[in-house]
Image: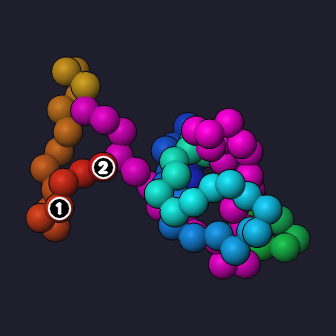
Amino acid sequence: MKFQPGERVELVHTDDPDTRLRTGDTGTVTRHQQATTGEVVHVAWDDGSRLMMCLDAGDRIRRIRPAATPSMPQPPATDGRPWR
Protein backbone atom coordinates (compact mmCIF):
# COMPACT_ATOMS: atom_id res chain seq x y z
CA MET A 1 0.00 0.00 0.00
CA LYS A 2 1.75 3.15 -1.20
CA PHE A 3 1.32 6.37 0.76
CA GLN A 4 1.31 9.62 -1.21
CA PRO A 5 2.86 12.92 -0.06
CA GLY A 6 0.20 15.06 1.57
CA GLU A 7 -1.85 12.11 2.86
CA ARG A 8 -2.85 12.29 6.51
CA VAL A 9 -1.93 9.32 8.70
CA GLU A 10 -2.37 8.14 12.26
CA LEU A 11 0.22 6.22 14.26
CA VAL A 12 -0.95 2.72 15.11
CA HIS A 13 2.30 1.28 16.50
CA THR A 14 6.04 1.91 16.81
CA ASP A 15 8.73 0.23 18.90
CA ASP A 16 10.98 3.32 18.76
CA PRO A 17 11.94 3.98 22.41
CA ASP A 18 13.24 7.47 21.65
CA THR A 19 10.06 9.05 20.27
CA ARG A 20 7.42 11.12 22.05
CA LEU A 21 4.83 9.84 19.56
CA ARG A 22 2.02 7.70 20.88
CA THR A 23 -0.74 5.63 19.29
CA GLY A 24 -3.32 7.99 17.79
CA ASP A 25 -0.89 10.82 16.97
CA THR A 26 -1.39 12.22 13.48
CA GLY A 27 0.83 13.61 10.75
CA THR A 28 1.32 14.23 7.04
CA VAL A 29 3.26 11.96 4.68
CA THR A 30 6.20 13.73 3.06
CA ARG A 31 7.73 10.77 1.19
CA HIS A 32 7.30 7.02 0.61
CA GLN A 33 10.23 4.95 -0.53
CA GLN A 34 11.46 1.42 -0.90
CA ALA A 35 14.80 1.52 0.94
CA THR A 36 17.43 -1.19 1.30
CA THR A 37 16.02 -1.84 4.77
CA GLY A 38 12.45 -2.11 3.47
CA GLU A 39 9.42 0.10 2.97
CA VAL A 40 9.81 3.52 4.62
CA VAL A 41 7.28 6.33 5.01
CA HIS A 42 8.57 9.77 6.04
CA VAL A 43 6.04 11.66 8.17
CA ALA A 44 5.88 15.24 9.45
CA TRP A 45 4.01 14.68 12.71
CA ASP A 46 1.63 17.30 14.06
CA ASP A 47 3.68 17.63 17.26
CA GLY A 48 6.54 19.07 15.16
CA SER A 49 8.66 15.93 15.01
CA ARG A 50 9.69 14.05 11.89
CA LEU A 51 10.00 10.31 12.15
CA MET A 52 10.29 7.69 9.43
CA MET A 53 8.00 4.72 9.76
CA CYS A 54 9.78 1.49 8.82
CA LEU A 55 6.81 -0.61 7.79
CA ASP A 56 8.81 -3.80 7.21
CA ALA A 57 10.29 -3.49 10.73
CA GLY A 58 6.92 -3.39 12.51
CA ASP A 59 5.96 0.29 12.50
CA ARG A 60 2.30 0.75 11.60
CA ILE A 61 0.35 3.77 10.38
CA ARG A 62 -3.07 4.09 8.82
CA ARG A 63 -4.65 6.63 6.50
CA ILE A 64 -7.16 9.00 8.01
CA ARG A 65 -9.88 10.77 6.11
CA PRO A 66 -9.66 14.54 5.70
CA ALA A 67 -12.30 16.60 7.49
CA ALA A 68 -15.40 17.40 5.47
CA THR A 69 -15.58 20.84 3.91
CA PRO A 70 -18.66 22.60 2.51
CA SER A 71 -17.40 21.95 -1.03
CA MET A 72 -16.49 18.33 -0.28
CA PRO A 73 -19.04 16.54 1.92
CA GLN A 74 -17.84 13.59 3.94
CA PRO A 75 -18.99 10.23 2.55
CA PRO A 76 -20.96 7.92 4.83
CA ALA A 77 -19.08 5.14 6.58
CA THR A 78 -19.71 1.67 5.20
CA ASP A 79 -18.74 -0.23 8.34
CA GLY A 80 -21.06 1.56 10.78
CA ARG A 81 -18.29 3.66 12.32
CA PRO A 82 -17.91 7.42 11.81
CA TRP A 83 -15.14 8.56 9.46
CA ARG A 84 -12.12 10.13 11.11
The kind of residue tagged 1 is Arg
Task: Tell me how the rendering is colored.
Answer: rainbow
Q: Going 24% across and 51% down the picture, which residue do you hit?
A: 83
Is residue 53 on the magenta stretch? Answer: yes
Q: Crowdedness of circle 1 by 10 Å Cα count: few (<14), some, many (20+)? A: few
Say above or below: 4 vs 48: below
The kind of residue tagged 2 is Arg
Whether residues under marks 1 and 2 lie with C-beta atoms below 8 angstroms apart, the answer is no
- Return the mark for residue 10: none
The kind of secondary structure element at disc 1 is loop
- In the rendered image, the residue lying farthest to the top is 71
Residue 32 in view of the camera: no
Q: Quadrant of residue 50?
A: top right
Find the magenta span and give its range: 43-68
Residue 35 % position (x, y):
83, 65
- Position of 6 with respect to 30 (left or right) is left
As measured in the structure, the alpha-carbon distance from the residue carrying label 1 to the one carrying label 2 is 9 Å
- Position of 76 with respect to 8 (left or right) is left
In the foreground, 68 or 11: 11
- In the rendered image, the residue lying farthest to the right is 36
Q: Which residue is mark 1?
A: 81
Residue 12 % position (x, y):
51, 67
In the foreground, 7 or 20: 20
Residue 43 % position (x, y):
66, 47
In the foreground, 30 or 27: 27
Q: Going 20% across and 39% down the picture, which residue do you hit?
A: 74
Residue 7 % position (x, y):
51, 43
- Return the mark for residue 84: 2
The kind of secondary structure element at disc 2 is loop
